Image: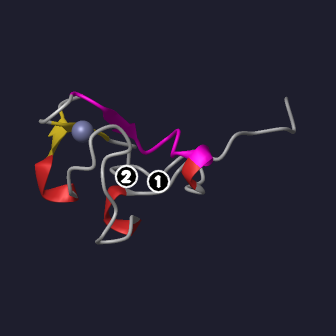
Amino acid sequence: MNSITEQEPPLGMEYQAWMCVVCGFVYDESEGLPEEGIPPGTRWEELPVDWSCGECGAGKDNFIRLGS
Ligand SMILES: [Zn+2]
């Protein structure tokens, strides 16, 4: 058995990816945006309401959830 286990999301809480409909930028919850100070595993709902697309500046309203 490997004692080093990665943190896995609880059942039904799998990470989602969100895409900016303006420029196609994808925010992946499992990866976060470390360069913006957003650690991996940060849920979309946990992003600041005034968070905006790092590519084009569009607000969260302009993102759609990608199907898995
Ligand atoms: Zn964008």
Residue 51: give its label. none
Q: Are marks 2 and 1 in contact (CB under 8 Å)?
A: yes
Q: Quadrant of the N terminus?
A: top right
Q: Is residue 40 visible?
A: no
* Residue 66 occupies quadrant: top left
Q: Is residue 49 visible?
A: yes
Q: Is residue 31 left or right of residue 28?
A: right
- In the picture of the structure, the residue carrying the numbered disc 1 is 10
Q: Is residue 28 left or right of residue 61?
A: right
Q: Measured from the top left, where is residue 51 in percent x and y?
A: 34, 62
Q: Is residue 4 above or below residue 49?
A: above
Q: Is residue 34 magenta?
A: yes
Instruction: Identify the residue at image location x=53%, y=39%.
Output: 31
Name the colour scheme. Answer: secondary structure
Q: CA distance from mark 2 to mark 1?
A: 5 Å
- In the picture of the structure, the residue carrying the numbered disc 2 is 13
Task: Give the quadrant of ligand 1.
Answer: top left
Amino acid tagged 1: Pro
Residue stretch rendered in magenta on the structure: 24-35
Q: Bin the neighbour count of mark 2 within 10 Å (Cα to Cα): few under 14, some 14-19, many 20 and up.
A: few
